[in-house]
Amino acid sequence: MNDTRPSPPAARGPAMLRALRHRNFRLFFFGQLLSLPGTWIQMVAQSWLIYRLTDSAALLGLAGFANQFPVFLMAPFGGAVADRFDRRRLLIGTQVASSALALLLAALTLSGQVTVWQVFTLAALLGLVNGVDLPARQAFTVELVGREDLPNAIALNSSAFNSARLIGPAVAGVLVAAAGEGWCFLLNGLSYVTVVAALAAMRLAPVARPVHTGSLLAHIADGVRFVRGHVPIRSLLLLLGMVSLAGMPYAVLMPLFADRILGGGAQGLGILMSCAGGGALLGALALAARRSPRGLTAWVPWAAFGFGLGLVAFSLSRSFWLSGLLLVPTGLALIVQMAASNTLLQLLVPDALRGRVMSLYSMMFMGMAPLGALLAGSLAELIGAPATVGGGGVLCMLAALWFRRRLPDIRTAVRGLASRGGGAAAPGA
C-alpha cells in the first residue's frame, strides 16, 4: 500500500507541517532528522582534520573538491538510474555505503593511522555515492506526498537539513576539542541506521516506470535536451551553478576564518557553521509556511543577491561575534534560493524526467561547489581568504541581477510550460 493519502482533517496539524500528514514522509523526515546531524558533524571534523594535518588553505580547497566533484561526474548517471529503477532500494544502498565509508574513516583516525591521501580517497568515494543519492532522494519525495504537498515537503526536508546544520557543527566543535575527529566519524557512521530503518518501514506500491530501450547515455541526453529547451529551468540551474561556484566555497575556508582571522579555534568553527545553519533553518521554515508556490520566482534573485551581500560583509568583519551574526542572514538567503529553485524545478518537470532533471540540480548545487572550492583554496593562498570570499559574494550579486533582468521572460515561460502540462506550477509563480 502506497501511503501518500493525507490523514483525516483532525490530524492534519499546522499548515507548515502539512506534508507530515503522509505516513511515508513522516518516516523519511524523522529518519533524516536523526541522521543528518551526523553528516554535518563529519563535514566539520573532516575539514578540521585536514587543516590540522596540513595547515594549508590550498589543501582545504582540494579536500572540498575531492568530496564534491564526484557528485558532478556521477549525478547524471544517478538521475538516469533513479528514473529507471526503484528509488527506495537505491536510497537504502547509498545509505549503507555512506555508513561504511564513515566507519572506515573513523577506524583509521581512531587508530592514529590516518593520512591525508586516505581522507581524500574516502571523501571522493563518498562523493560518488552522493552522486546517486542526491537525485534519487530529490525524485523520491513526490512518491511520498504527491504533487499537492510537494512544495511543503521540500521545505520541511530543507528544515531538517538545516536543523542538522545548526546542531551538527556545534557538537562537532565540542567533540573534536574534547575527544578528536575519529569519534565524530564513528557517530556519523552509526547515524545512517535511522534512515535505513525508515526506508525499510515504508509501505509503497510499485511505481509504473516507462520502459527505456535506449542506452543510459541516451537517457541522460534526453534530460539535457529537455532542460536546454525550457528557459525557466535552464535559468534557475545557471543561477544555482554560479552561486555554488562563486559563493558556497566560503564554507571550505571557514577553518581559516575561525582560527587565523577570528581566533576561535575548533569550537569557533562549530559556532560559525551553526550560525549559518540557524539562518538557513529560518529560511526553510519561512518557505514551509507558504501555502502556494506563487511568487517564488521573485524570491530567487533577491535571495541570491542577499547571499552575495552577506558574504561581502562577512569577509570585511574581524569580530568573531559580528561574523557569526552576519552568517545568520547569509545562511537564510542561501537556503531560500536553493529550496525555492528546487521547488520550482520539481513543479515544472514531468515525472518521467524527474530524476534526470534533479540530477542536473545536484550537479549545479553540489557539483559546481568543488570547482569553486579548488579555486577558492588557491586564491586564498595568493590574496587571502577575506578577499576570496568577498569576490565570490560580488559574483553572486551580479548573477542575481542577471536573473532579475530576465524575470519577465522567465515568468512567461513558466506559465507556458505549466499550461502545456510540463508541471504543476501555479500561474504567476
Image (cartoon, rainbow, N blue to C red):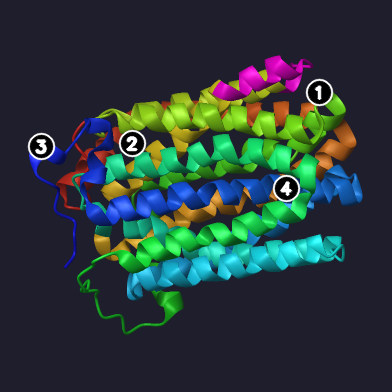
Q: Secondary structure at mark 2?
A: helix
The mark that comes first in sequence, 1 or 2, is 1
What residue is shown with label 3?
10
Verify CB contact (< 8 Å) between mark 1 and mark 2.
Answer: no
Look at label 4 and name its amino acid: Ala
Specify start and end residues of the magenta stretch as a single range: 315-328
Q: CA distance from mark 2 to mark 3?
A: 39 Å
Q: Nearer the viewer, mark 2 or mark 4?
A: 4
The mark that comes first in sequence, 1 or 3, is 3
In magenta stretch: residue 323: yes
Q: Which mark is residue 45?
A: 4
Q: Secondary structure at mark 3?
A: helix
What residue is shown with label 2?
410
Q: CA distance from mark 1 to mark 4?
A: 19 Å
Look at label 2 and name its amino acid: Ile
User: Mainly helix, strand or loop, the magenta region?
Assistant: helix
What residue is shown with label 1?
262
Asked whether, in this view, residue 234 is left or right of residue 307, the answer is: left
Residue 175, located in which quarter of the rendered image? Answer: top right
Mark 3: few/some/many CA within 10 Å (<14, 14-19, 20+): few
Q: CA distance from mark 1 to mark 3?
A: 51 Å
Mark 4: few/some/many CA within 10 Å (<14, 14-19, 20+): many
Residue 406 at least partly seen: no
Q: Nearer the viewer, mark 1 or mark 4?
A: 4
Look at label 1 and name its amino acid: Leu
Q: CA distance from mark 4 to mark 3?
A: 44 Å
